Amino acid sequence: MEKIDSVTLSVINNALINACREMGTAMMRTSYSPIFNEGLDFSCVIFNPDGEMTGQAEFCPAMLGSAQYTVKWTIEELGLDAFKPGDVVIHNDPYRGQSHMPEHMVLKPVFFEDKLCCFVGNVAHICEIGGMAPGSFAAEATEVYQEGLRLPPVKIMSQGEYVQDVWRIILTNHRTPKSSWGDLHAMIGSLNIAETRMLELLERYGPEVFESAGTQLLDYSERWMRTEIKDIPNGVYHFKDCMEDDGVTDKPVWMRLKLVVKDDEIIADWRESDPQALGPVNATFAVTAAATYSAVLHVTNKDIPVNSGCFRPIRVITKAGTVVNVRHPGPSVGGNTETHPHLQNVVVAALSQAVPERAAASEAGTACNFLFGGVHPETGEYYTNYHFDGGGWGATVDHDGNSVMCPVNGNCRNTPAEVLETKYPFLTVEYSMRTDSGGAGKYRGGLGGRRVLRVVGPEITVSALMDRTKTNPWGLFGGEQGDSGGILVKKKGETDFRTFSEVYGTVCPSKFTCIALKEGDEVMILSPGGGGYGSPAERSLEAVAEDVRQGLVSVQSAEKIYGYKDC
C-alpha cells in the first residue's frame, strides 16, 4: 500500500472532518424537529468498506463510539455485494449494535469507478418512533416492543429510488409522521452532500491514495493512543455507581468496573455489574463500549484524531444479560441517555486514581428526559417532543465545572424557552441556575438548572426518565458532591410542588409514563449540580466572593462551607 506523505495525510484527514461538519450543518438547517436544529442530537461519520470509522465531526460522542458497531453489523448482515450506488440503509436495532431505538443510523455507500470506496453516515435521534409513550421514551417499559418501531438494517432508498413499502411502515408507526419524514430527509440530504465531497477527494487523489490515507490515519491514531496510555501508571483500578431505580422497581442497579492499565492497553471489565434491569435503564454493549472510549479520550491528548484506530488499545469486557449488555427483549431506551453518562463517569473516576490531574469529578449524569405530546390547540395537529435539560459538570484540577450543560456523552444544546413556547403549548415560568447546587471544592462543580413549565393547552401527556434524584454526583479529592435533581408537579390552584409519586402514585419519582396534565398545571425540572474537586478550604476567597456576587453560591453557604464572612 502506498505510503502517504504527512501533508497529504493531513489534508485528507481535514477533508473528512469538514465533510462531516458540513453534513451536520445541513441537518441543522433542514430538519423539522428541535432535537435536530436546536439540540444537535446527532453525529456525522465516514467509514471505510470494513466498517471502521475514518472521519467524524464534533457532535455527539455517545454515537461516535457506538456507530462503528452499528455499521459493522450492517455490513455483516447485508454483505458488501448488497450495496449499490444510490442506496441508503436505515437501522435502529439495539441488539444489532445500536445504542437505543430512537437513534437511527442512515448509511450510504460511495462508489468511484464502480468500486465501493467508503460509506457516509449519520446517527440521529428521531424524537417519535411509536411505542407506549408520546416521545418514545417509556420509563415503565419492560420489553423492547413497548419502546417503538425496531428496524433491522434495511434499505430506505434503493439505487436512488424510494423503497415505498419501508417508508410506509415507518411513517405509519410514528405518531408525528410529518416531522419524521422531514428529519429523515434532512439526514439523507446530508449524506448526499458528504457523498459529493468524497467523490471530489477520490477524483483528486484516486482510490488507492484515498484508501491508503484512511488506513494510515487509523494506524496513526492507534499509535498515539498507545503512547498516551503508556503515560498512565500500570495498575488495577476499581469504581462503581448505580442507577437509583429502573422505572419499574424502586431498587438501585449497580455498574461495577475493574479497569486494568497494562503498558499500552486498557482493559475495562464490567462483568461484575448487576443483572439487567426490568425497566429501561439497560445499556447495550455498544453503549458501554462508547462510554469507555469517551472516558479514555477525556484523560488523553485532545488532538488525537478520533477514529476507530484510537479505540483499538481499549478492550471492553461485559457479560450478556447484565445492565451493561442487555439481552433481548430487555428494554434499553434510557441506557444511552442515563446509564451512558454514569458509565463514563465511572471510568473517569477509576482513572482518577492513576492520573488525578487529568480527571474530573462526576457531572450531573442525567439528560433529564422529559417527553410530551398532545393535540395542539392552535393547529389541531398531534405533536410530540423529546426534551432534555443540562446539569452541572464536574470540576477539574484547575477549573470550575460548567453550569447547565447537557451530559458529556451528548455534547448537545439546551432548547431555548422561546422555541418551546413557539412550537408547543407550554409557558416557561422560570429558567435559571440553581444557587448552591454545584459541589463545593477548591474548584466548584457546575450548577444545575431549574425550568418551570406551565401547561397552556387543554391537555398534555407527559413522561419522564431521569436519574440522580436520590443519589448525588460525587466530588474528587476532598471536593463535595453536587446537589441531586428532580422533577416535580404543581396542580392548578395548589401552592406547592410535589413529586409525581406523591401526586400520581408512580413507582419511581423521576421515571414514569403517560401522565395527563391539564391547563394551568406546572412542571418543575431540577437538574443536578456537578461534583467539586479538592478541599473547599483551598478555594481562594476572591473566587468565593465572585461566586456570591454572581448568585452561584449563597451568602450562607459561603460562610458555612468556605468560612468567608466578608460577603
Image (cartoon, rainbow, N blue to C red):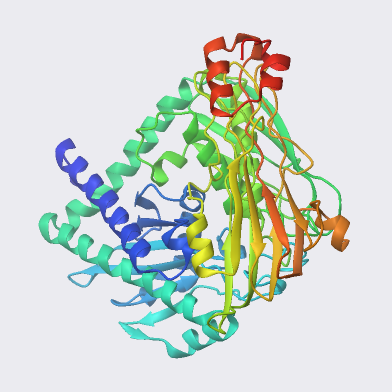
Q: Check the image and report above or below for 395 versus 142.
A: above
Tell me: 495 left or right of 378. right
Q: Residue at x 70, y 21 (%)?
A: 557
Q: 513 or 273: which is nearer to us?
A: 513
Question: In the image, residue 70 lies at what x, y percent?
Answer: 50, 61
Residue situated furthest left in the rendering: 204
Mark yes or no: residue 351 visible: yes
Where is residue 39? Give x, y as percent.
47, 56
Horizontal and vertical percent position of residue 32: 43, 71
Among the 4 quarters of the image, the one containing residue 10: top left
Which of the two residues, 144 or 219, is positioned nearer the viewer here?
144
Left or right side of 353 for 417: left
Nearest the camera: 56 or 38? 38
Residue 556, compared with residue 495, is above or below; it is: above
Quadrant in the picture for residue 321:
bottom right
Q: Quadrant of the C terminus?
A: top right
